[in-house]
Image (cartoon, rainbow, N blue to C red):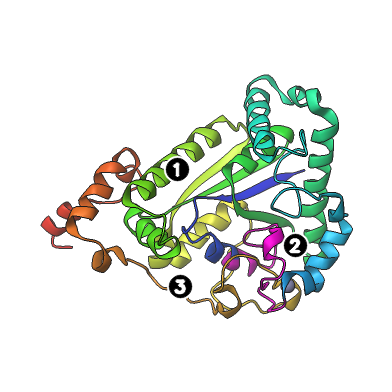
Amino acid sequence: METLNFIVCPSYHGATLLSLLLNNHSAVTSLGDTIPARKYLGSACSCRRAVRDCPFWSEVLEGLEATRFTEGEKVLPLWPRISPRWQKWNRLAALGLGTVAHVAGPRTWSLVGRDRDEYADTYSRFYALVRRLHGTQLFVDGSKSMSKAFVLASIFPEADVRIIHLVRDPRDYHCSNLKNNPDTATLASSTREWLDRHLAILAMSKMIRRKKYLRIRYEDLCEQPEQTVATILGTLEVDYEDLFHPQTEGRKNHVIGNDTMADFDGTIRPSTKWRSRLTAIDVRQIERRTRPLFGRFGYRESARQAADGL
Ligand SMILES: [Zn+2]
């Protein structure tokens, strides 16, 4: 594996949008959620076919003999299959072994050599097959999972790792969480998830040695799209191209993510819903609860913005 490229962030941070843009680059493939979930095989790919009827995904899953993997919520394993029955244990074991491997070296993985080999082989073949089918040089994994990036980087220590850490205003994240999970989302759960997941991304990416780490704010992608995309392409070490258009190559149009993909026309619409949807008390609560990172990520408290006349 020469390079490992990831978009990492919690849900509702604009990862699918960034994947769609990067997939428009002639040298790059990025497929949104990257690996189909079993329960979404009947859902639409961006080519407007159901994933199970999509010729691209059929060829990929056949090429990887995905029918070997009968457990787990995804059609390919997210972690080495150390214990086929216990998916949660696999994640914990993979993170534990990955942590030791980042410190002590990749030989740590020889403890579960056969499972490591199957996992490493599956991802090497997956990324290579997709690049070959698309005629591209780079695969950018848009599955958002920092844990997966961390584990793969520990198994392939010779690879150059690029981490694109996408952050979003926690006030807008809370609005999206309320919209998508009306029965369960609360201000406390939104702020806890936002903070915990970003802190975990920072901690895990710090442990990866051969890496480039780039933090991008979703708001900057919306407000200064060309400049922000130029920075991302620089980190990926590919030339600048105009990416703000619909996907023109049918063979690459197989992104998995959310309902907006098939209609993506290259336009990015800024989103600051929190200003109209949240009360002043909620806004102050979110700013206070996310404070360790809120300012560090460059967000400004509403009271200060108001004082500055913004
Ligand atoms: Zn498709």
Q: Secondary structure at mark 2?
A: loop
Ligand 1 closer than 8 Å to label 1 CB: no
**Dominant secondary structure (helix, strand or loop) of the stretch shown in magenta:** loop
Instruction: Tell me which residue sits at (60%, 33%) in the image.
Output: 208
Q: Amino acid at mark 3?
A: Ile
Numbered circle sitting on residue 136: 2
- Residue 27 highlighted magenta (yes or no): yes
On the picture, is 18 further left or further right than 290?
A: right
Residue 222 percent coordinates (x, y): 41, 66
Could you classify mark 1 by the number of other residues whose Cα lies within 10 Å: few (under 14), some (14-19), or many (20 or more)? some
Q: Which residues are magenta?
A: 20-49
Residue 147 percent coordinates (x, y): 60, 40
First in sequence, mark 3 or 2: give its number: 2
Instruction: Tell me which residue sits at (35%, 52%) in the image.
Output: 186
Q: Amino acid at mark 1?
A: His
First in sequence, mark 2 or 1: give its number: 2
First in sequence, mark 1 or 3: give its number: 1
Q: Amino acid at mark 2?
A: Thr
Position of the C terminus, as image quadrant, is bottom left
Question: To which residue does mark 1 refer?
Answer: 198
